[in-house]
Structure formats: structure tokens, C-alpha cells
Image (cartoon, grey):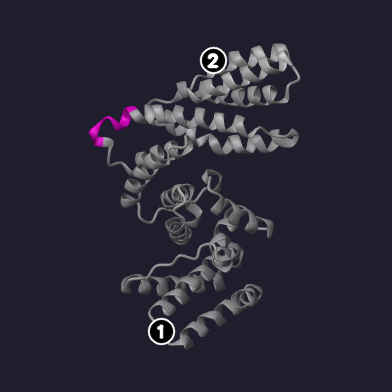
Amino acid sequence: MDGEKSVEALIQKAYNSMKAPDAGGARLALEEALKIDFEEPEVVYALTCLSWWTERFKRLEECDTAYDRGSFILSQWKSFYSFLDRLQAGGKSERCLYAVKHFVFSSALAFFADILDCGDNQHDPALLLLVGRCYKGVGNYEEALHYLEQAARFKREDGETLSELADVNALMEETRAAKALFREAFFTDPQGIEIKNMDSELILRLAGRVREMGYAGAELLEWIPVYGALFGVLSVKRALKLAESGRLKQAIFTLENEVRGNSEAAGLLVPRLINHYLWLIDHYENVHEDPSLIEQTMLKIKIVDPVLYERYRN
């Protein structure tokens, strides 16, 4: 029992060190725990995760600037998830991953913080986005919201920025704002969104349901807003300005031609076109347009995807 308590205390010490962030202190604590019980699964798991990141951090010497170092750390998060997919065959530790996440994002934030002190960089949307992501990663949602809102003012049609802002709103339980922002992000720039960077259950559950339907990769990103509307998840809508409705109709015309002339890209173009149709239907309903126009648009959906049309009707 005393040994178990010692191992548990060392594991917690290691996780506290990770959050500091102090990789060296975390490794020492885990190695001490391993001496007591070399078969403790959580110790082995934590050491494996820490070793993966330690190897990545060695490559920071190749980066020329603080911005490059912080960006490199964040760029490895997706690769880490791929590594976890292979590692988790034997189970995973959520509290370990929580500590690792703090370690990674606080380490990146430290590099960006120095840059922010320079007044010239405080209006750089790319930097503001990365800083917002870091604060979200360490669980400081208020600060994350502050920086992501600033980034969104500069990048109003950037899917990555809008989705990060939506994600933070969802984590802060600002559900209505989150739904509206996610819907906007998946309309304006679906391929700019990285699901692996999302943390909120709102979008992860929706993505999971669409993934279970057989969609993956780039196609998954195009179908998420379609089924988000069908399932009533991305249900918060906004009125379109006159110029926006004109651009929407022009985009639909272009997509219709592309669908007819490019069968190889249909996997991406068809759901994108359907999502545009849904936005047009919402616009018609919002301005109380002639119901026949709504029906005409619904029939277009039927031509493109009869199965989805029946689901939508039912």
C-alpha cells in the first residue's frame, strides 16, 4: 500500500511538473515511480508521451525565431494525436493527457508571450490566433476568447480562426454563439478547419456522428455543416445582407457547373453545394420569400442527393 501511495504521489508530482512546464522534473518523478513499480501502466504511458515530446522539442534548435519555435510546437499536436491512436491500444490516461496538453500549450505560449510585448505584433492576426489557441489549450478560456475575437476581426472569413472562436464559446457554454460561429466557419472555409484542434463536445459529437456515416478527411469537413443542419446542431442562423445573398446565388451557380463538369471532385463539391442550398433556403425563409423558391431549391437538393432530401423532409 505504501508503495502504491508513493507511486501515485510521484505520478501527481510529474503531472504538476508538466503543467509548470518542467519536462526534466516530470521525467525524474516518473523514473522514480518506475523504480518502485516498473509495470505501472500509467507511469509507462506518461513516460512514453513525455519522451515523444522531448524528442520533438530537440528540434526547436533548428528554429530561428521565437515565433517559429512556438508555431513548431503547435504544429506537432496533430502528429501527437496520430501517435496516441497507435499507443492507446492498451488504454489511455485522461489526466496524463491533460497534463501533457498543459505542458505543450504553455511551452508554446511562453515563446509567443515575448513577441506580444512588442507593440508592432499586437495586431498580427496569425499571432493572435496562435496565442488564443494556447490559452484555450491551458484552459484559460477568457484570455483565449480575448485573443481569438481580435484575430477574427482581421480574418472574418478564415475557417480556422472562426472555428477556434466557436470552440472557445462552446467551452464557455455560450452555446448560441458557438453554433452560429461554427456554422459560419464551415460555410466560409470548411477546409481551413482542423477537427483535431477542437475541444468542445458540441462539435466533436457532431463530427463523430458524421464520421460514423463513413465520411473522413476532407469530405468529413464538407458534410459536417450539412448534417449539422439536418440534426439541428448548427441551428443558429443569421440574416444575410443583400450583397451576401447575391454572392451566395453566384456561388451556387458556379458550384452547380463545377459539379456537372468535375465528377472526380464530387465528393467535396456536392456537400458544399448542398450547404449553399441550405443557406439560400434559410435566407428565403428569413425574408419571407415566395415559398415556390424554397421548394425549387429543395428539389435541387433532391436531384443532387435524393437520400439526403428524404432525410431532410422527414
In the picture, residue 313 is in which quadrant? Answer: bottom right
Q: Nearer the viewer, residue 120 or 134?
A: 134
Indicate the quadrant containing the N terminus: top left, top right, bottom left or bottom right: top right
Q: Is residue 293 above or below residue 241?
A: below
Q: Disc 2 on helix, strand or loop?
A: helix
Q: Which residue is mark 2?
A: 25
Q: Residues within 10 Å of mark 2 (few under 14, many from 20)?
A: some
Q: Which residues are magenta?
A: 114-120
Amino acid on which the number 2 mark rests in the picture? Gly
Query: Residue placed at 63% from the left, 38% from the top?
Result: 82
The answer to whether residue 54 is left or right of residue 283 is right
Query: Residue placed at 72% from the left, 25% from the top?
Result: 41
In the picture, residue 269 is in which quadrant? Answer: bottom right
The answer to whether residue 42 is left or right of residue 231 is right
Q: Which residue is mark 1?
A: 289
Indicate the quadrant containing the C terminus: top left, top right, bottom left or bottom right: bottom right
The answer to whether residue 296 is left or right of residue 158 is right
